[in-house]
Image (cartoon, grey):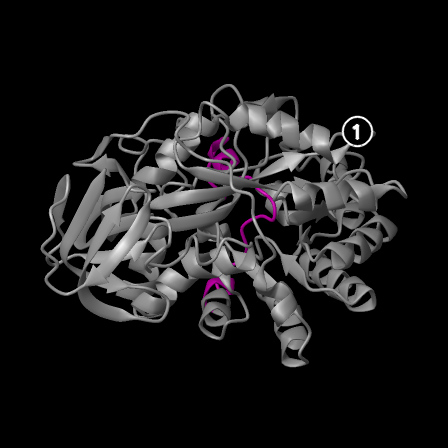
């Protein structure tokens, strides 16, 4: 199939110009003024932005957690992503203790195959790293899994000790892969949590109040120190607080290759949104938790200064009724996670571009180009250029939209951003040359998404 996009304003991380785009099959073939060749479909993008498809590098679809699993699978989750203008995701394959990493990758590929509607890759969550771990990690890199995640939180479940993290970093350095860290001091948090329960403080808000920002900053600082000793870059996932950001900024000012992402929930929600009567706060239970509102401005400043390079979602939805309510009498039993995969592009455009915190190029950079570069997909993904995948979004900057459970496509029974009004929305979404969203209808099909064998990202070039 061929497509011709006419009269649009093309926005990439570096450019802003008027041109037409001609697409053949799954690639961008030609960009120029007043293109006149015949095409199977012509799209008039007058008055619209033409941007590279969004890339969300932190999702958890069909993920087991706390005796249940996230409510979006690879079909519903990727479809919701597409409605929001995201055309590529990187999810997490979780290694079970005592098993090979390849077993985890096989399991997660089976979860996605036949279901994913957009392209996808995987990070590998390491829970067990025997001395032969370098063989496993090398195999994963050959399979196109070039990033690994380790947890400093969730003792006895996912948490890795410092020795394991350090050895993973050393092995990553030998393979050119990138280590991603969930930075919270899990053992200290568990101690605080036990005291909270003993004091009868079991409501959902205590999930947030027992995870202080200093527990994040300490873990960020420790992960940076371990990476320095191992002489490798490190990537901090879902940075939530100014305390953590200060450690990242200090290291980067010294020339240390530290990178970080944050998420919309930390930019638009805060502890002020909790403290509701009853059990409603369970909808906002995720880790790291929400912080005091003043942290939001600090995180935006970190995005402006490039101390934070990427905005992802950490999308991990659970139904309020039937899943979150497992923790009605004990916040420890509330499944951690929230739904956001559909709304990242809208929220960052409205809260960033419309509020003049960032410009159009930086919006594209944070939501598409930097993710592609950091995780070994550029220039195939993350830009608009001849030869790149035809992952393109026609964005209507004037379209007003109210985020709500009544209108979203996420398979969950609430919205974290219920009633939040945004201006700017994806109008047409194209994935590898296929129009998959148009006129608010999904035109794609399950299983059309391809597994991405990723290369080495830019972290080693810092």
Residue at 56%, 54% in the rendered image: 375
Q: Secondary structure at mark 1?
A: loop
Left or right, residue 192 beside residue 91: right
In the image, residue 335 above or below residue 431 = above
Left or right, residue 376 beside residue 389: right
Position of residue 5 measured from the top left corner of the image (x, y, whole percent): 17, 51
Would residue 8 be seen by someone viewing this image from the given angle?
yes
Position of residue 200 measured from the top left corner of the image (x, y, whole percent): 70, 34
Left or right, residue 99 beside residue 119: right
Position of residue 356 measured from the top left corner of the image (x, y, whole percent): 30, 70
Frontmost residue, 102 versus 403: 102
Frontmost residue, 244 versus 45: 45
Residue range highlighted in magenta: 275-297
Q: Residue furthest front?
A: 37
Residue at 47%, 21% in the rendered image: 321
Residue 283 located within the stretch drawn in magenta = yes
Label 1 sits on residue = 99
In the image, residue 78 above or below residue 250 = above
Few, some or many residues within 10 Å of mark 1 (<14, 14–19, 20+): few
In the image, residue 7 above or below residue 82 = below
């Amino acid at each position: 199939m061929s497509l011709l996009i006419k009269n649009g304003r093309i926005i990439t991380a570096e450019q802003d110009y008027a041109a037409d785009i001609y697409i053949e099959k799954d690639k961008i073939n030609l960009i120029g003024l007043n293109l006149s060749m015949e095409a199977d479909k012509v799209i008039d993008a007058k008055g619209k932005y033409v941007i590279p498809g969004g890339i969300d590098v932190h999702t958890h679809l069909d993920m087991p957690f706390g005796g249940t699993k996230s409510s979006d699978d690879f079909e519903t989750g990727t479809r919701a992503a597409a409605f929001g203008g995201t055309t590529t995701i990187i999810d997490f394959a979780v290694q079970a203790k005592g098993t090979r990493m390849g077993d985890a990758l096989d399991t997660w590929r089976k979860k996605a195959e036949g279901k994913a509607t957009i392209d996808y890759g995987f990070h590998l969550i390491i829970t067990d790293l025997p001395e032969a771990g370098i063989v496993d990690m090398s195999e994963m890199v050959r399979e196109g899994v070039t990033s690994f995640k380790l947890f400093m939180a969730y003792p006895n479940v996912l948490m890795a000790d410092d020795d394991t993290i350090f050895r993973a970093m050393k092995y990553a350095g030998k393979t050119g892969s990138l280590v991603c860290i969930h930075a919270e001091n899990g053992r200290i948090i568990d101690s605080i949590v036990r005291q909270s329960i003993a004091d009868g403080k079991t409501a959902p808000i205590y999930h947030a109040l027992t995870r202080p920002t200093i527990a994040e900053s300490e873990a960020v600082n420790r992960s940076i120190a371990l990476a320095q000793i191992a002489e490798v870059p490190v990537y901090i996932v879902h940075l939530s607080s100014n305390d953590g950001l200060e450690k990242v900024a200090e290291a980067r000012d010294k020339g240390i290759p530290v990178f970080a992402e944050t998420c919309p929930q930390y930019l638009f929600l805060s502890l002020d949104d909790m403290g509701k009567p009853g059990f409603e706060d369970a909808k906002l239970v995720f880790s790291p938790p929400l912080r005091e509102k003043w942290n939001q401005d600090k995180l935006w400043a970190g995005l402006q200064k490039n101390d934070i390079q990427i905005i992802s979602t950490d999308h991990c939805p659970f139904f309020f009724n039937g899943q979150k309510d497992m923790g009605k009498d004990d916040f420890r039993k509330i499944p951690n996670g929230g739904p956001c995969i559909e709304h990242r592009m809208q929220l960052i455009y409205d809260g960033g571009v419309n509020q003049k915190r960032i410009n159009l190029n930086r919006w594209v950079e944070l939501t598409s180009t930097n993710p592609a570069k950091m995780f070994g997909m550029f220039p195939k993904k993350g830009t608009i250029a001849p030869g790149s995948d035809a992952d393109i979004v026609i964005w209507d900057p004037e379209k007003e939209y109210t985020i709500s459970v009544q209108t979203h496509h996420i398979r969950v029974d609430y919205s974290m951003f219920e009633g939040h009004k945004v201006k700017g929305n994806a109008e047409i979404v194209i994935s590898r040359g296929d129009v998959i969203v148009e006129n608010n209808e999904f035109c794609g099909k399950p299983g059309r998404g391809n597994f991405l064998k990723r290369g080495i990202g830019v972290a080693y070039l810092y």
